[in-house]
Image (cartoon, rainbow, N blue to C red):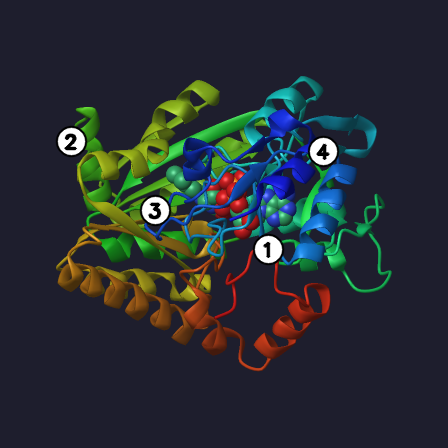
Amino acid sequence: MLRREEIEELRSIVGAEWVSTGDSVRKLHSRDESFHESVLPDVVVWPHSTEEVSRLLKWAYRRKIPITPWGAGTSLEGNPIPVRGGMVISLQEMNRILAIRQEDFQVDVQAGINYKELNRQLSRYGLFFPPDPGADATIGGMIGNNASGIRTVKYGATKDYVMRLVVVLPDGEIIQTGTRARKSSSGYDLCRLFTGSEGTLGIITEATLRLVGLPANFMALRATFPTLRAATDTVFQIMSSGLTPSAMEFLDEEVVRVINIDRGLSLQENPTLLMEFDGFSKKGLQEEIAFVEEICRGNGCSSLDKGIGPEERNRLWEIRHLTFESIKRCHPGLSPLIVDVAVPLSRYSDMVAFIKQAVADLNAYIFGHAGDGNIHVVIMDDPGDERRWEQVQRANEKIVLKALELEGTCTGEHGVGIGKRGFLPREHGKSLKLMKRIKELLDPEGLMNPEKIFL
Ligand SMILES: Cc1cc2nc3c(=O)[nH]c(=O)nc-3n(C[C@H](O)[C@H](O)[C@H](O)COP(=O)(O)OP(=O)(O)OC[C@H]3O[C@@H](n4cnc5c(N)ncnc54)[C@H](O)[C@@H]3O)c2cc1C
Protein backbone atom coordinates (compact mmCIF):
# COMPACT_ATOMS: atom_id res chain seq x y z
CA MET A 1 0.00 0.00 0.00
CA LEU A 2 1.12 3.54 -0.66
CA ARG A 3 2.02 5.62 2.37
CA ARG A 4 0.04 8.68 3.40
CA GLU A 5 2.87 11.07 2.33
CA GLU A 6 2.99 9.40 -1.08
CA ILE A 7 -0.74 9.97 -1.58
CA GLU A 8 -0.16 13.61 -0.62
CA GLU A 9 2.57 13.86 -3.26
CA LEU A 10 0.15 12.52 -5.89
CA ARG A 11 -2.42 15.10 -4.79
CA SER A 12 0.13 17.83 -5.34
CA ILE A 13 0.60 16.64 -8.94
CA VAL A 14 -3.02 16.30 -10.13
CA GLY A 15 -5.05 18.08 -7.42
CA ALA A 16 -6.60 16.55 -4.29
CA GLU A 17 -9.98 15.72 -5.82
CA TRP A 18 -8.36 13.69 -8.64
CA VAL A 19 -6.74 11.09 -6.37
CA SER A 20 -8.81 8.37 -4.74
CA THR A 21 -8.07 5.52 -2.37
CA GLY A 22 -11.76 4.92 -1.67
CA ASP A 23 -12.90 1.30 -1.68
CA SER A 24 -15.69 1.72 -4.23
CA VAL A 25 -13.43 3.60 -6.68
CA ARG A 26 -10.65 1.02 -6.34
CA LYS A 27 -13.21 -1.75 -6.84
CA LEU A 28 -14.51 -0.09 -10.02
CA HIS A 29 -10.94 -0.14 -11.38
CA SER A 30 -10.14 -3.69 -10.30
CA ARG A 31 -11.73 -5.60 -13.18
CA ASP A 32 -12.81 -5.37 -16.80
CA GLU A 33 -15.79 -7.06 -18.50
CA SER A 34 -14.15 -10.50 -18.48
CA PHE A 35 -14.26 -13.33 -15.92
CA HIS A 36 -10.62 -12.71 -14.94
CA GLU A 37 -10.05 -12.27 -11.23
CA SER A 38 -10.24 -8.70 -9.99
CA VAL A 39 -7.27 -7.07 -8.22
CA LEU A 40 -7.57 -3.79 -6.34
CA PRO A 41 -5.17 -0.97 -7.20
CA ASP A 42 -3.75 1.04 -4.28
CA VAL A 43 -4.83 4.33 -5.79
CA VAL A 44 -6.67 5.74 -8.81
CA VAL A 45 -5.70 9.11 -10.33
CA TRP A 46 -7.27 11.25 -13.05
CA PRO A 47 -4.72 13.55 -14.75
CA HIS A 48 -5.87 16.42 -16.99
CA SER A 49 -2.83 16.95 -19.22
CA THR A 50 0.12 15.19 -20.83
CA GLU A 51 2.43 17.08 -18.42
CA GLU A 52 0.54 15.69 -15.43
CA VAL A 53 0.78 12.16 -16.84
CA SER A 54 4.52 12.71 -17.32
CA ARG A 55 4.96 13.89 -13.71
CA LEU A 56 2.96 10.89 -12.44
CA LEU A 57 5.10 8.43 -14.39
CA LYS A 58 8.36 10.08 -13.29
CA TRP A 59 7.13 9.89 -9.71
CA ALA A 60 6.14 6.21 -10.02
CA TYR A 61 9.32 5.26 -11.90
CA ARG A 62 11.52 6.55 -9.06
CA ARG A 63 9.53 4.53 -6.52
CA LYS A 64 9.07 1.43 -8.74
CA ILE A 65 5.30 1.59 -8.43
CA PRO A 66 3.32 -0.41 -11.03
CA ILE A 67 1.10 1.62 -13.35
CA THR A 68 -1.99 0.53 -15.25
CA PRO A 69 -3.52 2.88 -17.85
CA TRP A 70 -7.33 2.86 -17.82
CA GLY A 71 -9.76 3.90 -20.56
CA ALA A 72 -13.28 2.67 -19.81
CA GLY A 73 -12.46 -0.84 -18.55
CA THR A 74 -14.56 -2.59 -21.23
CA SER A 75 -11.82 -5.06 -22.22
CA LEU A 76 -12.56 -8.77 -22.43
CA GLU A 77 -9.17 -10.36 -21.69
CA GLY A 78 -8.23 -8.77 -18.37
CA ASN A 79 -6.16 -6.13 -20.24
CA PRO A 80 -6.59 -3.25 -17.72
CA ILE A 81 -6.69 -5.29 -14.48
CA PRO A 82 -4.00 -3.90 -12.14
CA VAL A 83 -2.63 -7.33 -11.26
CA ARG A 84 0.21 -5.93 -9.15
CA GLY A 85 -1.81 -3.19 -7.48
CA GLY A 86 -0.08 0.18 -7.60
CA MET A 87 -1.55 3.13 -9.47
CA VAL A 88 -4.35 3.10 -12.04
CA ILE A 89 -4.13 6.17 -14.26
CA SER A 90 -7.55 6.84 -15.73
CA LEU A 91 -7.62 9.00 -18.86
CA GLN A 92 -11.32 9.77 -18.49
CA GLU A 93 -10.79 13.43 -17.63
CA MET A 94 -8.67 13.89 -20.76
CA ASN A 95 -11.65 13.64 -23.07
CA ARG A 96 -11.54 16.69 -25.33
CA ILE A 97 -11.48 17.12 -29.08
CA LEU A 98 -8.48 19.38 -29.68
CA ALA A 99 -8.96 20.18 -33.38
CA ILE A 100 -11.20 19.02 -36.21
CA ARG A 101 -9.37 19.41 -39.51
CA GLN A 102 -12.30 18.95 -41.85
CA GLU A 103 -10.37 19.68 -45.04
CA ASP A 104 -7.73 17.06 -44.15
CA PHE A 105 -10.22 14.48 -42.83
CA GLN A 106 -8.41 14.40 -39.48
CA VAL A 107 -9.13 15.01 -35.83
CA ASP A 108 -6.82 15.61 -32.86
CA VAL A 109 -8.20 14.19 -29.61
CA GLN A 110 -7.20 13.51 -26.06
CA ALA A 111 -7.06 9.77 -25.38
CA GLY A 112 -9.92 9.60 -22.89
CA ILE A 113 -12.66 10.61 -25.32
CA ASN A 114 -15.37 8.02 -25.90
CA TYR A 115 -15.47 7.09 -29.60
CA LYS A 116 -19.28 7.30 -29.74
CA GLU A 117 -19.16 10.86 -28.42
CA LEU A 118 -16.40 11.63 -30.93
CA ASN A 119 -18.57 10.34 -33.77
CA ARG A 120 -21.59 12.27 -32.49
CA GLN A 121 -19.59 15.49 -32.73
CA LEU A 122 -17.97 14.60 -36.07
CA SER A 123 -21.34 13.88 -37.71
CA ARG A 124 -21.98 17.65 -37.85
CA TYR A 125 -19.03 17.86 -40.23
CA GLY A 126 -20.14 14.87 -42.32
CA LEU A 127 -17.22 12.80 -41.00
CA PHE A 128 -16.74 9.68 -38.91
CA PHE A 129 -14.15 7.44 -37.25
CA PRO A 130 -15.15 3.95 -38.44
CA PRO A 131 -13.74 1.38 -35.94
CA ASP A 132 -16.74 0.49 -33.77
CA PRO A 133 -16.31 -2.04 -30.95
CA GLY A 134 -19.86 -1.50 -29.70
CA ALA A 135 -18.99 -1.07 -26.01
CA ASP A 136 -18.49 2.40 -24.50
CA ALA A 137 -14.77 2.44 -25.24
CA THR A 138 -12.31 5.36 -25.22
CA ILE A 139 -9.95 6.16 -28.08
CA GLY A 140 -6.95 5.40 -25.78
CA GLY A 141 -8.39 1.96 -24.95
CA MET A 142 -9.15 1.30 -28.61
CA ILE A 143 -5.60 2.19 -29.59
CA GLY A 144 -4.34 0.14 -26.62
CA ASN A 145 -6.15 -2.98 -27.85
CA ASN A 146 -6.12 -2.14 -31.57
CA ALA A 147 -9.88 -2.55 -31.42
CA SER A 148 -12.05 -3.15 -34.43
CA GLY A 149 -15.71 -3.93 -34.96
CA ILE A 150 -18.55 -4.38 -37.36
CA ARG A 151 -17.26 -1.89 -39.97
CA THR A 152 -13.69 -3.20 -40.06
CA VAL A 153 -14.52 -5.42 -43.04
CA LYS A 154 -14.68 -2.32 -45.25
CA TYR A 155 -12.93 0.39 -43.26
CA GLY A 156 -10.18 -1.37 -41.29
CA ALA A 157 -9.16 -1.52 -37.63
CA THR A 158 -8.00 1.23 -35.25
CA LYS A 159 -4.39 0.82 -36.44
CA ASP A 160 -5.45 2.03 -39.88
CA TYR A 161 -6.62 5.37 -38.46
CA VAL A 162 -3.76 6.33 -36.14
CA MET A 163 -1.59 9.00 -37.78
CA ARG A 164 0.15 10.63 -34.86
CA LEU A 165 0.42 9.94 -31.12
CA VAL A 166 1.63 11.74 -28.06
CA VAL A 167 2.97 9.09 -25.70
CA VAL A 168 4.43 9.34 -22.21
CA LEU A 169 7.10 6.67 -21.79
CA PRO A 170 7.42 4.70 -18.53
CA ASP A 171 10.16 7.03 -17.20
CA GLY A 172 7.98 10.09 -17.85
CA GLU A 173 9.58 11.27 -21.10
CA ILE A 174 7.07 12.70 -23.61
CA ILE A 175 7.44 11.73 -27.27
CA GLN A 176 5.46 12.25 -30.46
CA THR A 177 5.21 9.55 -33.12
CA GLY A 178 3.99 9.79 -36.72
CA THR A 179 2.96 12.80 -38.81
CA ARG A 180 -0.14 14.42 -40.28
CA ALA A 181 0.92 13.58 -43.83
CA ARG A 182 -1.31 10.99 -45.53
CA LYS A 183 1.76 8.89 -46.29
CA SER A 184 5.27 8.62 -44.95
CA SER A 185 8.16 6.21 -45.24
CA SER A 186 10.22 7.93 -42.61
CA GLY A 187 11.77 5.44 -40.21
CA TYR A 188 10.17 2.76 -38.06
CA ASP A 189 6.41 3.03 -37.68
CA LEU A 190 6.15 3.77 -33.95
CA CYS A 191 2.41 4.53 -34.17
CA ARG A 192 1.92 0.87 -35.06
CA LEU A 193 4.21 -0.19 -32.21
CA PHE A 194 2.09 1.58 -29.61
CA THR A 195 -1.18 0.53 -31.24
CA GLY A 196 -2.11 -2.80 -29.68
CA SER A 197 0.55 -2.52 -26.96
CA GLU A 198 -2.15 -2.67 -24.26
CA GLY A 199 -0.58 0.01 -22.09
CA THR A 200 2.63 -2.01 -21.63
CA LEU A 201 4.96 0.51 -23.33
CA GLY A 202 3.64 3.90 -22.24
CA ILE A 203 0.54 6.04 -21.90
CA ILE A 204 -1.05 7.56 -24.99
CA THR A 205 -2.37 11.00 -24.12
CA GLU A 206 -3.26 12.44 -27.54
CA ALA A 207 -3.89 11.09 -31.03
CA THR A 208 -4.40 12.43 -34.53
CA LEU A 209 -6.90 10.16 -36.26
CA ARG A 210 -7.74 9.78 -39.93
CA LEU A 211 -11.45 10.17 -40.69
CA VAL A 212 -13.84 9.09 -43.42
CA GLY A 213 -16.78 10.93 -45.00
CA LEU A 214 -20.21 9.75 -43.79
CA PRO A 215 -21.73 7.61 -46.53
CA ALA A 216 -24.79 9.04 -48.27
CA ASN A 217 -26.81 5.83 -48.53
CA PHE A 218 -27.15 2.57 -46.61
CA MET A 219 -28.72 -0.71 -47.41
CA ALA A 220 -29.09 -3.58 -44.94
CA LEU A 221 -29.96 -7.25 -45.30
CA ARG A 222 -30.78 -10.08 -42.93
CA ALA A 223 -30.60 -13.58 -44.42
CA THR A 224 -31.14 -16.96 -42.77
CA PHE A 225 -29.82 -20.31 -43.94
CA PRO A 226 -30.80 -23.95 -43.43
CA THR A 227 -27.32 -24.99 -42.26
CA LEU A 228 -24.28 -23.46 -40.65
CA ARG A 229 -22.12 -24.25 -43.65
CA ALA A 230 -24.57 -22.65 -46.09
CA ALA A 231 -24.30 -19.41 -44.09
CA THR A 232 -20.52 -19.45 -43.69
CA ASP A 233 -19.90 -20.46 -47.34
CA THR A 234 -22.04 -17.46 -48.33
CA VAL A 235 -19.66 -15.20 -46.38
CA PHE A 236 -16.70 -16.49 -48.34
CA GLN A 237 -18.50 -16.25 -51.69
CA ILE A 238 -19.61 -12.66 -51.09
CA MET A 239 -16.19 -11.55 -49.90
CA SER A 240 -14.29 -13.30 -52.69
CA SER A 241 -16.63 -11.95 -55.39
CA GLY A 242 -15.21 -8.44 -54.99
CA LEU A 243 -18.28 -7.01 -53.22
CA THR A 244 -17.48 -4.61 -50.38
CA PRO A 245 -19.99 -4.87 -47.54
CA SER A 246 -19.50 -2.26 -44.83
CA ALA A 247 -20.53 -4.92 -42.31
CA MET A 248 -21.00 -8.68 -42.47
CA GLU A 249 -21.95 -10.42 -39.23
CA PHE A 250 -22.73 -14.06 -38.51
CA LEU A 251 -25.01 -15.38 -35.73
CA ASP A 252 -25.64 -19.07 -35.09
CA GLU A 253 -29.14 -20.37 -34.37
CA GLU A 254 -28.48 -20.48 -30.60
CA VAL A 255 -27.82 -16.74 -30.59
CA VAL A 256 -31.07 -16.06 -32.43
CA ARG A 257 -32.87 -18.31 -29.95
CA VAL A 258 -31.71 -16.37 -26.86
CA ILE A 259 -32.51 -13.07 -28.56
CA ASN A 260 -36.05 -14.36 -29.25
CA ILE A 261 -36.42 -15.44 -25.60
CA ASP A 262 -34.91 -12.28 -24.14
CA ARG A 263 -36.72 -9.83 -26.42
CA GLY A 264 -39.97 -11.67 -27.06
CA LEU A 265 -39.23 -11.82 -30.82
CA SER A 266 -40.09 -14.58 -33.26
CA LEU A 267 -37.15 -14.54 -35.67
CA GLN A 268 -36.35 -17.72 -37.61
CA GLU A 269 -33.95 -19.67 -35.39
CA ASN A 270 -31.46 -20.48 -38.13
CA PRO A 271 -27.85 -19.50 -38.88
CA THR A 272 -28.15 -15.84 -39.85
CA LEU A 273 -26.08 -13.26 -41.74
CA LEU A 274 -26.50 -9.54 -41.20
CA MET A 275 -25.05 -7.33 -43.91
CA GLU A 276 -24.74 -3.67 -44.64
CA PHE A 277 -23.65 -1.87 -47.79
CA ASP A 278 -23.01 1.83 -48.09
CA GLY A 279 -22.19 4.12 -50.98
CA PHE A 280 -22.90 7.27 -52.96
CA SER A 281 -25.77 6.13 -55.16
CA LYS A 282 -28.86 4.10 -54.36
CA LYS A 283 -28.73 2.61 -57.84
CA GLY A 284 -25.21 1.28 -57.28
CA LEU A 285 -26.29 -0.19 -53.95
CA GLN A 286 -29.31 -1.87 -55.51
CA GLU A 287 -27.08 -3.55 -58.07
CA GLU A 288 -24.77 -4.81 -55.32
CA ILE A 289 -27.71 -6.11 -53.29
CA ALA A 290 -29.15 -7.96 -56.29
CA PHE A 291 -25.83 -9.79 -56.63
CA VAL A 292 -25.76 -10.57 -52.89
CA GLU A 293 -29.31 -11.92 -53.08
CA GLU A 294 -28.30 -14.20 -55.94
CA ILE A 295 -25.40 -15.62 -53.89
CA CYS A 296 -27.65 -16.10 -50.82
CA ARG A 297 -30.37 -17.86 -52.82
CA GLY A 298 -27.73 -20.05 -54.45
CA ASN A 299 -26.84 -21.26 -50.96
CA GLY A 300 -30.45 -22.13 -50.09
CA CYS A 301 -31.19 -18.98 -48.08
CA SER A 302 -34.58 -19.57 -46.40
CA SER A 303 -35.54 -15.95 -45.67
CA LEU A 304 -34.16 -12.60 -46.77
CA ASP A 305 -35.28 -9.26 -45.40
CA LYS A 306 -33.79 -6.00 -46.71
CA GLY A 307 -34.24 -2.27 -46.46
CA ILE A 308 -32.78 1.09 -47.47
CA GLY A 309 -31.82 3.93 -45.13
CA PRO A 310 -30.74 4.26 -41.50
CA GLU A 311 -34.11 3.30 -39.94
CA GLU A 312 -34.32 0.09 -41.93
CA ARG A 313 -30.68 -0.65 -41.10
CA ASN A 314 -31.43 -0.19 -37.39
CA ARG A 315 -34.51 -2.44 -37.60
CA LEU A 316 -32.62 -5.27 -39.30
CA TRP A 317 -29.51 -4.88 -37.16
CA GLU A 318 -31.12 -4.41 -33.76
CA ILE A 319 -30.51 -8.03 -32.83
CA ARG A 320 -26.74 -7.79 -33.30
CA HIS A 321 -26.42 -5.01 -30.77
CA LEU A 322 -28.41 -7.04 -28.23
CA THR A 323 -26.39 -10.22 -28.58
CA PHE A 324 -24.07 -10.11 -25.57
CA GLU A 325 -26.64 -8.68 -23.15
CA SER A 326 -29.33 -11.17 -24.23
CA ILE A 327 -26.95 -14.12 -23.75
CA LYS A 328 -26.00 -12.92 -20.26
CA ARG A 329 -29.62 -12.32 -19.23
CA CYS A 330 -30.63 -15.83 -20.30
CA HIS A 331 -27.99 -17.32 -17.94
CA PRO A 332 -28.36 -15.52 -14.62
CA GLY A 333 -25.62 -16.33 -12.12
CA LEU A 334 -23.20 -17.61 -14.79
CA SER A 335 -20.11 -15.84 -16.18
CA PRO A 336 -19.01 -15.53 -19.81
CA LEU A 337 -15.76 -16.74 -21.28
CA ILE A 338 -15.49 -15.01 -24.65
CA VAL A 339 -13.36 -16.70 -27.27
CA ASP A 340 -12.01 -14.34 -29.95
CA VAL A 341 -10.11 -15.83 -32.89
CA ALA A 342 -9.66 -14.90 -36.55
CA VAL A 343 -8.72 -17.05 -39.54
CA PRO A 344 -8.19 -16.47 -43.27
CA LEU A 345 -11.59 -16.15 -44.97
CA SER A 346 -11.08 -19.32 -46.99
CA ARG A 347 -10.92 -21.25 -43.66
CA TYR A 348 -13.93 -19.56 -42.05
CA SER A 349 -16.44 -22.35 -42.74
CA ASP A 350 -14.05 -25.04 -41.42
CA MET A 351 -13.35 -23.00 -38.31
CA VAL A 352 -17.03 -22.46 -37.48
CA ALA A 353 -17.82 -26.15 -38.09
CA PHE A 354 -14.94 -27.12 -35.77
CA ILE A 355 -16.17 -24.75 -33.05
CA LYS A 356 -19.70 -26.12 -33.24
CA GLN A 357 -18.38 -29.57 -32.37
CA ALA A 358 -15.93 -28.35 -29.75
CA VAL A 359 -18.66 -26.62 -27.74
CA ALA A 360 -21.46 -29.14 -28.28
CA ASP A 361 -21.85 -29.90 -24.53
CA LEU A 362 -21.61 -26.30 -23.33
CA ASN A 363 -23.88 -23.23 -23.13
CA ALA A 364 -22.17 -21.74 -26.15
CA TYR A 365 -23.10 -19.03 -28.66
CA ILE A 366 -21.18 -18.45 -31.88
CA PHE A 367 -21.19 -15.12 -33.69
CA GLY A 368 -18.74 -12.62 -35.09
CA HIS A 369 -17.45 -10.23 -37.68
CA ALA A 370 -17.62 -12.85 -40.41
CA GLY A 371 -16.35 -10.63 -43.21
CA ASP A 372 -13.02 -10.34 -41.34
CA GLY A 373 -12.81 -14.06 -40.59
CA ASN A 374 -13.31 -13.12 -36.92
CA ILE A 375 -15.32 -15.45 -34.66
CA HIS A 376 -16.49 -15.05 -31.10
CA VAL A 377 -17.87 -17.79 -28.91
CA VAL A 378 -19.53 -16.81 -25.66
CA ILE A 379 -19.51 -19.75 -23.25
CA MET A 380 -21.62 -19.25 -20.13
CA ASP A 381 -20.71 -21.21 -17.00
CA ASP A 382 -19.75 -21.01 -13.36
CA PRO A 383 -16.04 -20.28 -12.74
CA GLY A 384 -16.62 -21.55 -9.18
CA ASP A 385 -17.41 -25.04 -10.47
CA GLU A 386 -13.90 -26.32 -11.09
CA ARG A 387 -14.85 -29.29 -13.21
CA ARG A 388 -17.22 -27.33 -15.49
CA TRP A 389 -14.89 -24.36 -15.82
CA GLU A 390 -12.00 -26.61 -16.77
CA GLN A 391 -14.17 -27.97 -19.56
CA VAL A 392 -14.87 -24.40 -20.71
CA GLN A 393 -11.14 -23.56 -20.65
CA ARG A 394 -10.34 -26.73 -22.58
CA ALA A 395 -12.85 -25.78 -25.29
CA ASN A 396 -11.29 -22.29 -25.48
CA GLU A 397 -7.83 -23.80 -25.87
CA LYS A 398 -8.98 -26.25 -28.54
CA ILE A 399 -10.57 -23.44 -30.56
CA VAL A 400 -7.53 -21.17 -30.32
CA LEU A 401 -5.14 -23.95 -31.30
CA LYS A 402 -7.34 -24.78 -34.28
CA ALA A 403 -7.33 -21.11 -35.37
CA LEU A 404 -3.52 -21.12 -35.21
CA GLU A 405 -3.38 -24.39 -37.16
CA LEU A 406 -5.51 -22.69 -39.86
CA GLU A 407 -2.90 -19.87 -39.99
CA GLY A 408 -5.06 -17.48 -38.01
CA THR A 409 -4.53 -15.60 -34.77
CA CYS A 410 -5.35 -16.21 -31.09
CA THR A 411 -7.08 -12.81 -30.89
CA GLY A 412 -8.78 -10.92 -33.69
CA GLU A 413 -9.55 -7.80 -31.69
CA HIS A 414 -9.74 -8.23 -27.90
CA GLY A 415 -5.99 -8.30 -27.35
CA VAL A 416 -3.82 -10.63 -25.30
CA GLY A 417 -4.32 -9.25 -21.78
CA ILE A 418 -4.06 -12.11 -19.31
CA GLY A 419 -6.16 -14.68 -21.14
CA LYS A 420 -4.19 -15.20 -24.35
CA ARG A 421 -0.59 -15.00 -23.07
CA GLY A 422 -0.02 -18.74 -23.25
CA PHE A 423 -0.69 -18.87 -26.99
CA LEU A 424 1.83 -16.24 -28.06
CA PRO A 425 4.90 -18.51 -28.36
CA ARG A 426 2.99 -20.71 -30.78
CA GLU A 427 1.65 -17.78 -32.82
CA HIS A 428 4.82 -15.68 -32.97
CA GLY A 429 7.72 -18.11 -32.55
CA LYS A 430 11.06 -16.28 -32.44
CA SER A 431 9.43 -12.85 -32.97
CA LEU A 432 8.10 -13.05 -29.44
CA LYS A 433 11.69 -12.67 -28.19
CA LEU A 434 11.99 -9.43 -30.14
CA MET A 435 8.72 -8.18 -28.65
CA LYS A 436 10.07 -8.93 -25.16
CA ARG A 437 13.28 -7.04 -25.93
CA ILE A 438 11.29 -4.01 -27.08
CA LYS A 439 9.35 -4.15 -23.82
CA GLU A 440 12.58 -4.37 -21.80
CA LEU A 441 14.09 -1.46 -23.72
CA LEU A 442 11.16 0.88 -23.08
CA ASP A 443 10.20 -0.40 -19.64
CA PRO A 444 13.32 -1.91 -18.01
CA GLU A 445 11.67 -1.97 -14.59
CA GLY A 446 8.57 -3.78 -15.90
CA LEU A 447 6.22 -1.22 -14.34
CA MET A 448 3.79 -0.51 -17.20
CA ASN A 449 0.73 -2.73 -17.03
CA PRO A 450 2.79 -5.62 -15.67
CA GLU A 451 2.10 -9.29 -16.44
CA LYS A 452 0.15 -8.50 -19.62
CA ILE A 453 0.88 -9.88 -23.09
CA PHE A 454 3.92 -11.91 -21.86
CA LEU A 455 3.89 -14.81 -19.38
C1 LIG B 1 -20.24 -5.94 -25.03
C2 LIG B 1 -18.83 -5.75 -25.54
C3 LIG B 1 -18.61 -5.85 -26.90
C4 LIG B 1 -17.31 -5.65 -27.39
N1 LIG B 1 -17.12 -5.73 -28.74
C5 LIG B 1 -15.89 -5.47 -29.24
C6 LIG B 1 -15.67 -5.48 -30.65
O1 LIG B 1 -16.58 -5.70 -31.46
N2 LIG B 1 -14.42 -5.21 -31.10
C7 LIG B 1 -13.38 -4.94 -30.25
O2 LIG B 1 -12.27 -4.67 -30.72
N3 LIG B 1 -13.56 -4.95 -28.92
C8 LIG B 1 -14.77 -5.20 -28.38
N4 LIG B 1 -14.95 -5.18 -27.03
C9 LIG B 1 -13.78 -4.98 -26.15
C10 LIG B 1 -13.48 -3.53 -25.74
O3 LIG B 1 -14.63 -2.72 -25.78
C11 LIG B 1 -12.39 -2.91 -26.62
O4 LIG B 1 -11.18 -3.63 -26.54
C12 LIG B 1 -12.09 -1.44 -26.29
O5 LIG B 1 -11.17 -0.93 -27.21
C13 LIG B 1 -11.55 -1.20 -24.88
O6 LIG B 1 -11.57 0.20 -24.65
P1 LIG B 1 -11.60 0.81 -23.19
O7 LIG B 1 -11.59 2.29 -23.31
O8 LIG B 1 -12.65 0.21 -22.37
O9 LIG B 1 -10.15 0.38 -22.69
P2 LIG B 1 -9.69 -0.38 -21.37
O10 LIG B 1 -10.40 -1.67 -21.25
O11 LIG B 1 -9.76 0.54 -20.21
O12 LIG B 1 -8.15 -0.62 -21.71
C14 LIG B 1 -7.75 -1.41 -22.80
C15 LIG B 1 -6.24 -1.61 -22.78
O13 LIG B 1 -5.59 -0.42 -23.22
C16 LIG B 1 -4.81 0.16 -22.18
N5 LIG B 1 -5.07 1.59 -22.25
C17 LIG B 1 -6.22 2.25 -22.00
N6 LIG B 1 -6.07 3.56 -22.22
C18 LIG B 1 -4.77 3.74 -22.61
C19 LIG B 1 -3.99 4.87 -22.97
N7 LIG B 1 -4.49 6.08 -22.99
N8 LIG B 1 -2.69 4.67 -23.28
C20 LIG B 1 -2.14 3.42 -23.28
N9 LIG B 1 -2.83 2.32 -22.95
C21 LIG B 1 -4.14 2.49 -22.63
C22 LIG B 1 -5.24 -0.53 -20.90
O14 LIG B 1 -4.21 -0.61 -19.95
C23 LIG B 1 -5.66 -1.89 -21.41
O15 LIG B 1 -4.54 -2.73 -21.55
C24 LIG B 1 -16.23 -5.37 -26.50
C25 LIG B 1 -16.48 -5.26 -25.13
C26 LIG B 1 -17.76 -5.46 -24.65
C27 LIG B 1 -17.99 -5.34 -23.16
Residue wearing tag 3 = 250
Label 3 Cα neighbours within 10 Å, binned few <14 / some 14-19 / many ≥20:
many
- Compare residues 419 and 231 and report the one nearer the observer: 419
In the picture provided, is 416 more to the left or to the right than 130? left
Residue wearing tag 1 = 196
Q: Please report whichever mark, 4 or 2, sits nearer to the chain's N-terminal start.
A: 4
Q: Which is more foreground, mark 3 or mark 4?
A: 4
Give how far across and how far down residue 274 sits, in percent: 37, 39
Mark 4 touching mark 1, by CB under 8 A? no
Amino acid carrying label 1: it is Gly
- Compare residues 105 and 423 and report the one nearer the observer: 423
Residue wearing tag 4 = 12
In the picture provided, is 364 more to the left or to the right than 165? left
Which disc, if any, is residue 414? none
Q: Is residue 118 visible?
A: no
- The local secondary structure at tag 2 comes to helix
Give how far across and how far down residue 327 sits, in percent: 24, 39
Q: CA distance from mark 1 to mark 3?
A: 25 Å
Q: Please report whichever mark, 2 or 3, sits nearer to the chain's N-terminal start.
A: 3
